[in-house]
Amino acid sequence: MNALIATVIVIGSRPRVDEAASALDELRDRGGVRRVLISEGAETRAQADEQDTTIRVDGLSPQYVDNAVAWLRLSSLPAVVWWRGGAADALERLAHLADRLVVDTDPPDEMWGRLPALFDRTAVTDLRWSSLTRWRSAMAHLFDVESVRASVPAMRRLEVAAADRAAARLFAGWLCSCLRDLCTLDISIGAGEPDARTPLSRVRLSGDGVGITLQVRGAQTCLEAELDGAGGARVVPLGATTLASRFAEEIGVRTRDAAFERALLAAMETRS
């Protein structure tokens, strides 16, 4: 068995907890985790079923979830709470028990509204953030081009086509927070490919005589970045986009993510 690197505590409805458990099964060759799987219900006592490195508690009332987590976590291992749904008040009571809190709900608005109050209590993120890593990286690299940096004050519009509207808002929030002191963007979010491997299909940042486009091509395995009038395009692989791979990226981060926090605050202002 691989050495244990963390306790991952999954909380949500039974189907969503089971889905997460399957994703964690796929990560066994990357490093061992101690798994605590808690599905919400009406039970007032936690009946723990333990097998190897997996502990399952089914049907627990939300008001007792934090007690179960305090009982089952180990002080010797970092505790990562993977929140896949449930009573919002329970989420807030878990903050001091988690070294990292990964929110994974749809729609996310209620949870997003509660996260800023937790920023100073634990490292917080949304699983959508890792699904946007390649998009954010590709956009950031374009600003290494001198002509792009010089054109920032002329930027006026950000258009995003997305299958996941919340992910589009988070991306827009990230970009707007990065450029806040340099330009103001009008944001437009439209529908993307419904069966896409990635939450976004196309992003265009444009202004007076300048434009940047990011979009997926072909079998949706690559991301293409192009500057208006520059000729040619940069193409980078999207990488793995499964639930397991996205969570694996998050579990590797232990510190507070200021870029995510700023992006979330800006995303909550975006309703376009």
Image (cartoon, rainbow, N blue to C red):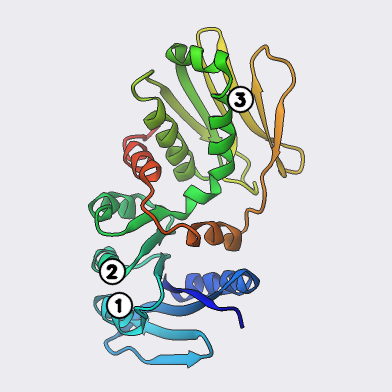
* Residue at image mark 3: 213
Q: Position of residue 105 (x, y in %)?
A: 42, 58
The answer to whether mark 3 and mark 2 are in CB contact below 8 A is: no
Q: Identify the amino acid type marked 2.
A: Leu
Disc assigned to residue 218: none
State the separation of the CA atoms marked 1 and 2: 8 Å
| Mark 1 lies on residue | 65
The quarter of the rendered structure image containing the N terminus is bottom right
Q: CA–CA distance between discs 3 and 2?
A: 41 Å
In percent of the image, x 58 and y 20: which residue is there?
145
Q: Type of residue at label 3?
A: Thr
What residue did someone put label 2 on? 94
Front residue of this view, candidates 118 and 114:
118
Q: Horizontal placement of 135 versus 264: left or right?
A: right
Give residue 136's position: percent from left, percent from top.
53, 37
Look at the numbered disc 3 and give the secondary structure of its residue.
strand
Residue 57 image offset from top left, x and y in percent = 40, 85
Q: Quadrant of the C terminus?
A: top left
Residue positioned 44% across, 31% down in the render: 175
